[in-house]
Amino acid sequence: MPAVAETLDTVESLTQSGYKWGFETDIEMEIAPKGLTTDTIRMISAKKEEPEWLLEWRLNAFAAWQAMEEPTWAKVGYPKIDFQDIHYYAAPKRPAPKSLADVDPELLRMYEKLGIPLKERAILAGVEGAAAEAAIPGSSNPNIAIDAVFDSVSVATTFRDSLAKVGVIFCPISEAVREHPELVRKYLGTVIPVSDNYYAALNCAVFTDGSFVYIPKGVRCPMELSTYFRINAKNTGQFERTLIIADAGSYVSYLEGCTAPQRDENQLHAAVVELIVMDDAQIKYSTVQNWFPGDAEGKGGIYNFVTKRAACRGARSKVSWTQVETGSAITWKYPSCILQGEGSVGEFYSVAVTNNRQQADTGTKMIHIGKNTRSTIVSKGISAGKSDNTYRGLVRILPRASGARNFTQCDSLLIGDQCGAHTVPYIESRNPTAKIEHEATTSKIAEDQLFYCRSRGLSEEDAVGLIVNGFCKDVLKELPMEFAVEAQKLLAVSLEGSVG
Amino acid sequence: MLSINNLAARIEEKEILRGISLDLPAGQVHAIMGPNGSGKSTLGYVLSGHEGYEVTGGTVSFEGQDLLAMEPEARAAAGLFLAFQAPIELPGVNNANFLRTALNAIRRARGEAELDAIGFLRLARAESKRLGMPDDMLKRNVNVGFSGGEKKRNEVLQMAILRPKLAVLDETDSGLDIDALKIVAEGVNALRSPEFSALVITHHQRLLDHLVPDRVHVLSAGRIIRSGGPELARELEANGYAGVVGEAAAA
């Protein structure tokens, strides 16, 4: 049997056997009845004790959503979603913990399974002196703060005090609505309007929680901010909402990483992330996405319809999106940058892996509005099995964007002969001084590469892992160090199926 | 060490090896010479387990094991190494990382402890220095952007680090200048011991001046048509293959 065919066999047999992180935590839930009406929205808003303006905002979004059609332009296929067959609110039954010591032990065991480092678990568990111990070099990385989203309610937030000292706000967005209403009201929905697109409108109407970050002027956030998302309740769509504001001259690095339990029903996930960056400020936003991709036939995986957009409002502001996407049955995601401020910079580094029946349609939009704005796009798509992997990108240079520059590199790697790789780049330049470069390659893992590695003693799985990681290196090096290792492992697991 | 008995192999429908028999005792270096298309490289690939070649007959025993029944990586773990005629490029894969992964895979398979990054780098730097190679070769991506000579030297470096019991060198001398040729020969000579054997596939006498073989075999149309001592290589150099091949055909 040719080596590649054998690899595919191995991958198939192993991915059928189970999803490594497919477990479900047994915590009592409070669930809203299925279906979406204005009553559902009023109930969510009331549960969260929201102000009247936010309820109005949600209802407006709901009205907009009802008038919209589900988009069909992406190269993905799935059975029609019955939006009335979804629970829109699920919360752990206990009241939101007032302190970390109140965190459910079951939840802490889940963190352990997710591989959250010991020190962070200790802090999440509220162990006395855990934060101080965390500062000891080598014990773990002391420079990561976590806001954990467990289904719809943020149950624990760490490092609040040390962040508060420098004026950084990092909390669940529902809390920010209560504690910092002026900031939320000023920025929420200003990057992605309520009627931006079908899924974003749905999110605006029913979002339950997510993270809020505010970095004050001139502050360099002293640690990585990290959110572990997790979808847990059966058949509960999760609609996170994230809002990050980097005020003038500030810097923050933010990471989201996700895993999800195995189940049969498809799960809808429609998050919205808005970033706002002022003069000379920078946001580095990294994602490692590993939601349940479905079984070998594509059954039961997550539908991931996400809207992520950054507004580079200030001069010389900068946003870097880095994503490693290995999970979900369907990925529909285009983290974008509106480069408004003069000399602002947008970057998009992406690795998207699809296997079995997974479908990914992902890319970015770089909208150059300001003078001398620059953008870089590096996209690495890896397709295996019977999957489809599409890069879809837009580079738009508006008339005022003199001296704008873009560099785009799109590479596709195919494993086997039953998968698809597609590149759909849109380029619109309305300023003659703009410089746009686009490079694209498509390659296959060659039999002779595998043989060369194996003749040196590497197993076929190790060889594939090495070659794939080599292919993705330009993107992986953009990830914060502690997550780059995790991402490499994830790539290996996704493709080699070294499960268990 | 290596015992090949009546080995036949084909690629797709084309017969390449038509019954090769050869005994390579431990501690010896044998040269395989012959004109283009005689099956020299095929022999190397079949020995190391390339799946593009189908073995249609014969046996190969390596230290008493049935070599043909083993996966390529198991052959490497057992101590076989093939230096490629055209080494393969692995874009984005760091040479040192590649070599350490390979070495540790082999060590694991042999039940030996793995080398950590520091231990490995110490070993790799020492070996590359001994072979007169620049340090940056370890930092570059495997064979990417290497000149022909650098690729061959990289194969010798891999061999020096992986320390095989049996090395098959497939025209490692081709395209090398005389200095590089010496380095390759020294690389093999340094490994010479009663426990190490090598099968050196070459076109030219040149390499054999520096790497004196115990035996020379002449391959033609998939068969060994003559075997002899080192003097056979010089005879070939003087008279060309045509003479030897013609002689065999006439005999």
Image: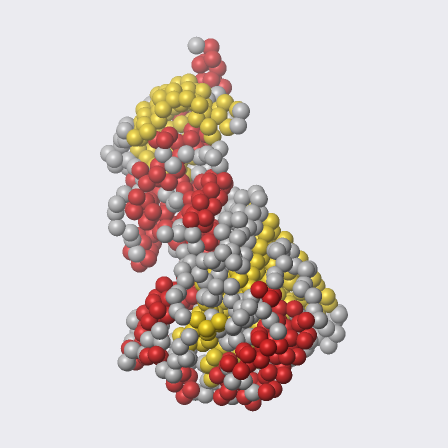
Q: Quadrant of residue B165?
A: top left
Q: Does A166 appear above or below B230? A: below
A147 with respect to A431 (left or right): left
Say whether residue A314 is left or right of residue B58.
right
| Vertical side of B189 occupied by A411: above or below | below
Of all residues, the one furthest to the left in this rendering is B194
**A337 shown above or below B149:** below
Q: Residue at x 27, y 43 (%)?
A: B110
* B143 and A156: which is toward the camera: A156
Name the residue at 49% across, 56% down. A264
Of residues B168 and A199, the one drawn nearer to the viewer in this rendering: A199
Residue A55 lies, with reference to residue A417, above or below; the image says below
- How many numbered marks, from 0 up? 0
Chosen colour scheme: secondary structure
| Image x and y of residue A232, in percent | 45, 66
Q: Residue A116: in sight, yes or no? A: no
Left or right of residue A135: residue A81: right
Question: At 44% from the left edge and 42% from the top edge, which residue is drawn?
Answer: A452
- Residue at position x 53%, y 53% in the image: A299
Residue A494 screen position, x and y as percent:
46, 54
- Residue A69 on image: x %, y %: 69, 66
Q: Quadrant of residue A92?
A: bottom left
Which residue occupies the foreground of this view, A129 or B233? A129
Is A380 positioned to the left or the right of B223 in the image? right
